[in-house]
Image (cartoon, helix red, strand yellow):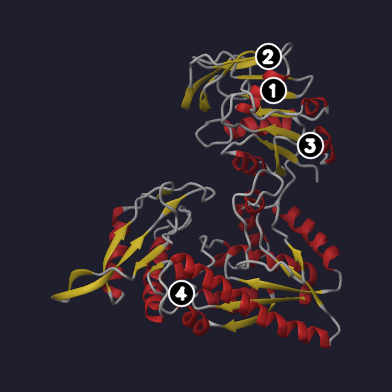
Amino acid sequence: MKPVLVVDFGAQYAQLIARRVREAHVYSEIVPHNISAEDVQGKNPAAIILSGGPSSVYEDGSPKLDPKILELGVPVLGICYGFQILAQTLGGRVDKTGKREYGATKLEISDGGILLSGQPALQVCWMSHGDQVMQAPAAFQVLASTETTPVAAFESKEKKIYGVQWHPEVKHSEQGQRVLENFLYKGAGLAPTWTSGNVIAEQVEKISQQVGSARVICGLSGGVDSAVAAALVHKAVGDQLTAVFVDHGLLRQGEAEQVERDYVAATGIRLVVVNAEEKFLSALKGVSDPEEKRKIIGREFIRTFEEAERKLVAEAAKDNTPIKFLVQGTLYPDVVESGGGVTAGIKSHHNVGGLPDDLQFELVEPLRTLFKDEVRAIGAELGLPMEIVSRQPFPGPGLGIRIVGEVTKDRLDLLRKADAIVRDELTKAGQDKLIWQCPVVLLADVRSVGVQGDGRSYGHPIVLRPVSSEDAMTADWSRLDYELLAKISNRITNEVEGVNRVVLDITSKPPGTIEWE
């Protein structure tokens, strides 16, 4: 599969560009700006997109592009900083004029060319720049301008090099996706053939070749990623896979049953269930610090999984069919943020809570090149229960970090009831698929006075945290209907004993995180 390479110049939107390309059913990968022409050629790309970035192209130390990349004959699209890099490298002129453009900007198209063909002559695009391309490279056709930017887009059909000053990848650019699709389909001559069905077929073949006749284990968490990863591996190797589900007692209402009943029924996977609730609650007793809770939950998960794993390894040894592989639900953003060939690592991702340095298994990571929405689409294609495929993101430590304070059985049961009410009402109102997620938080160490049953109550507050986001890197609180919020509040205070107050968190990210702990 020949990828479209997204060259990252430090843009906050590099991942978004890659996603938009994939939404056009063309495969994309992110690479660092300092990649050499030789390395680019080694990846055999179908096209190249140069991202935006916060620097000025004429400053010392600003990110540069290997100019030989533009001599490879591969179609190139430059966006914002990438547009200015093209202009500078090819002989155009980029100046700091003191005129800036941020946010919604009116764009006038003088000649649609290939890149802007079929678009309105006047449109709104999303700008974010302080420098302007004042002169296009020789033999390049200027396509558009704004009030302060004389060269807002250009192209060379002969060289197959195109560029725009604005950000077509953001939704605020009215014709943004059309710009990208014009480049991909018309400028680069690509076909929209990258689909869920093709990904499944490709991964099944790849997994079959990697695993051969060996046995495989997978830790199921109840979430989307591990469920889809296991289903893909099972489709490839069948009963060679055994999934281990550690029920730590920190899941939401009905989720353990969904894994044990619905998921197994849909996939036919051999599932080993380990009921470890008492073990986890015992380890968490008396602990309120959120980081300590996370460490304890991660540690106990690994220990519990390893114990189940040892039993399976011993069983496999008797049959002379060793377990050689471990399935991980690693996603592409995990790879990027961990420094997977792009930039310095932001954080490490280990989907099983952390992997030992002396891991005895080879990893199988069938989702390693995919974004979350793509994983959901593949899960649906594989016939997984929609309750699992469409499930909102849920933290690995589960409800343990949605209880602010010590985690106890009573508090978990209380929070589970409140959370179930919220999910039920969001679903009834058709809102659960319109928001990214809605953490429900129990302030266990806080009590407030209330009036319930004509008497004084002294109960806990429940916090609703509905947020909207594309990638969880930033988020805004979701403006849910007041009548819906009122219904949720009434049900919780009436049906959940020990709660007499429901509050709404209206903080964006940043400054607040999505989860409270």
Q: Nearer the viewer, mark 4 or mark 2?
A: 2
Q: Amino acid at mark 2?
A: Gly
How far apart in space, not on screen, are marks 3 and 4 (Cα)?
47 Å
53 w.r.t. 382: above or below: above
Mark 2 touches mark 1? (CB < 8 Å): yes
- Three-letter residue code for mark 1: Leu
SS of the residue under disc 2: loop
| Amino acid type for the residue under numbered disc 4 | Gln
Please name the residue shown 74% across and 67% down the image.
233
Among the 4 quarters of the image, the one containing residue 484: bottom left
Q: What residue is shown with label 3? A: 46
Q: CA distance from mark 2 to mark 1?
A: 8 Å
Q: Toward the viewer: 211 or 378?
A: 211
Q: Which residue is mark 1?
A: 86
User: Would you call the spot at circle 3 few (<14 residues within 10 Å), some (14-19), or many (20 or more)?
Assistant: many
Residues at marks 3 and 4 touching, judged by CB atoms closer than 8 Å:
no
Mark 4 or mark 1, which has the lower sequence index?
1
